[in-house]
């Protein structure tokens, strides 16, 4: 089933541990698809899908170019490619230069999601030691989406959520337990 | 109307103008990426809106080539993804050896790094009768490619990748460096025909035995991808090879059944023969 609504997640330093909290939160049945950008070294295989497979209710896989977003599925950006969400709910990849020293970049995913799906987007910005994702989550906010920023006090690396809080007042500032609670109920929220 | 809707109208109008006036067709390019590139062009050319950019495009002489450089992504390097080249050497070259002469098409060659890489490997592996068609939609890229001059900064990475790709000597055998640039041996480009060609509007120009088209199709919407696969199918002789970028596949397209997978992680396919 094609997804109706989308959660986009961005994480950098400390991200694997935070994702272990966040990704298993999503419960089925659901009309959501989830896209994740985690900053990883450019070379080598993407081990994230296999690392999370056994602990998630949603199916989890590496995003492929031209793929239609299915509900109840988590798509991980491949190393060394930007991931975008398109208007027809397909995913696209790109080799454009790194943004914020990052490819994949969280801003690229978040901005494409905000542009293409507007209020159907929930953005989640987690731990990290840089500024990627701040502009993107601000655009999700502007286009009427829901914005969740990890409480910098609870983040292993606070710089990334902090950078977002300097430019927007998000829908919620949450620690990982609160995020887990919010996301486990997200499919029950009314359609925008 | 919300901002993104207006921006989409402006993008469609701009791309329509580019097509009508300059015959370059970006209308079926993935929208997110083309939007980012247009936004970068707005900053670079000090335009307050896409409509302002369109005004410049239509009324300012010589502006289009400058914009074109922004509309295409030119990320490439010498021996990028060395495993791909190693796989060509090990799995494709032995087959190509059975032909008296071969033609290779590097589609979307950008600034020519992959052309040089392949030319080096062909020579090292004893190919003498070959011709490479290197095509790109941007004539400025082709001019760079023809020179064979690259920044010396890239050489250490390129040398490592050359060895990983199965290079038999040292990359430095092929260039002379001075003043922070490396001039590659012009002999390497003697059997290369550079040509302006658009995968979205132009037709097939030759039979080929190997097509390498890497990280071009990721920017195309599925309908355009299908068109390109059909072009490739038409150009490739029976049992000829197609190499794609490492996140691209023919398996989602309608041409899927016309190809066998030769090397799945390195995205190398072979056109089926008649059975």
Image (tube, coloured by chain):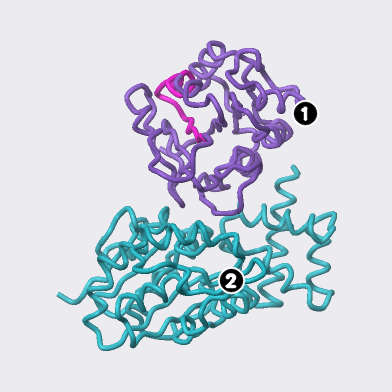
Q: Residue at x 83, y 68 (%)?
A: B56
Q: Chain of mark 2?
A: B
Residue A31 lies in the magenta-colored region: yes
Q: Which chain is purple?
A: A
Q: Residue at x 37, y 62 (%)?
A: B165
Q: Secondary structure at mark 1?
A: helix
- View extreme (left): residue: B275
Labels 1 and 2 touching (C-beta < 8 A): no
Q: Residue at x 55, y 16 (%)?
A: A179
Q: Which is closer to the viewer, label 1 or label 2?
A: 2
Residue B56 vertical position relative to residue B203 in the rendered view, above or below: above
- Which label sits on residue B137? none
Residue B29 vertical position relative to residue A166 in the rendered view, above or below: below
CA distance separating discs 1 and 2? 47 Å
Residue A101's quadrant in the figure? Answer: top right
Q: Chain of mark 1?
A: A
Question: In screen coordinates, is B185 left or right of B62?
Answer: left
Question: In screen coordinates, is B136 left or right of A119?
Answer: left
Q: Which chain is cyan?
A: B
Where is residue A73 shown, x and y percent of the image?
42, 33
Crowding at label 2, few (<14), some or many (≥20) Cα neighbours within 10 Å? some
Where is residue B104 shown, x and y percent of the image?
38, 79
State the residue position of label 2: B177
Q: Secondary structure at mark 2?
A: strand
Q: Quadrant of the N terminus of chain A?
A: top left
Query: Is A91 or A55 nearer to us in this picture?
Result: A55
Residue B128 lies in the magenta-colored region: no
Crowding at label 1, few (<14), some or many (≥20) Cα neighbours within 10 Å? few
**Range of the magenta residues?**
A21-37
State the residue position of label 1: A167
């Amino acid at each position: 089933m094609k997804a109706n609504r989308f959660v986009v997640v961005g994480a950098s330093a400390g991200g694997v541990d935070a994702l272990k909290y966040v990704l298993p939160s999503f419960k089925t049945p659901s009309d959501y698809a989830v896209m994740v950008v985690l900053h990883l070294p450019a070379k080598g295989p993407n081990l994230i899908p296999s690392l999370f497979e056994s602990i998630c209710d949603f199916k989890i896989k590496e995003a492929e170019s031209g793929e239609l977003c299915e509900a109840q599925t988590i798509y991980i950006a491949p190393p060394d490619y930007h991931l975008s969400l398109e208007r027809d709910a397909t995913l696209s990849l790109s080799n454009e230069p790194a943004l914020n020293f990052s490819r994949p970049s969280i801003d690229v995913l978040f901005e494409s999601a905000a542009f293409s799906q507007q209020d159907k987007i929930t953005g989640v910005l987690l731990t990290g030691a840089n500024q990627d994702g701040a502009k993107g989550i601000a655009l999700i906010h502007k286009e009427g989406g829901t914005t969740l920023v990890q409480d910098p006090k609870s983040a292993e690396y606070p710089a990334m959520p902090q950078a977002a809080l300097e430019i927007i007042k998000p829908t919620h500032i949450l620690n990982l337990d609160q995020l887990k609670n919010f996301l486990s109920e997200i499919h029950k929220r009314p359609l925008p | 109307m919300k901002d993104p809707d207006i921006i989409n109208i402006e993008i469609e109008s701009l791309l329509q103008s580019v097509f009508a006036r300059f015959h370059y067709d970006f209308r079926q390019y993935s929208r997110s990426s083309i939007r980012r590139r247009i936004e970068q062009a707005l900053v670079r050319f000090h335009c307050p809106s896409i409509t302002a950019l369109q005004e410049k495009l239509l009324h300012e002489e010589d502006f289009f080539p400058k914009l074109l450089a922004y509309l295409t992504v030119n990320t490439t390097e010498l021996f990028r993804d060395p495993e791909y080249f190693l796989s060509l050497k090990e799995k494709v070259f032995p087959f190509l050896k059975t032909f008296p002469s071969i033609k290779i098409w590097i589609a979307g060659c950008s600034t020519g790094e992959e052309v040089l890489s392949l030319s080096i490997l062909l020579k090292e592996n004893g190919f003498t009768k070959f011709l490479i068609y290197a095509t790109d939609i941007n004539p400025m890229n082709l001019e760079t490619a023809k020179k064979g001059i690259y920044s010396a900064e890239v050489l250490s990475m390129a040398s490592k990748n050359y060895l990983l790709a199965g290079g038999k000597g040292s990359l430095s055998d092929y260039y002379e460096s001075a003043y922070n640039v490396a001039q590659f041996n012009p002999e390497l480009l003697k059997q290369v025909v550079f040509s302006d060609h658009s995968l979205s509007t132009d037709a097939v120009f030759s039979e080929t035995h190997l097509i390498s088209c890497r990280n071009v199709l990721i920017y195309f919407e599925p309908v355009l991808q299908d068109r390109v696969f059909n072009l490739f199918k038409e150009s490739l002789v029976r049992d000829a090879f197609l190499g794609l970028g490492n996140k691209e596949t023919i398996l989602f397209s309608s041409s899927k059944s016309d190809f066998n997978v030769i090397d799945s992680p390195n995205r190398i396919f072979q056109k089926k023969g008649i059975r």
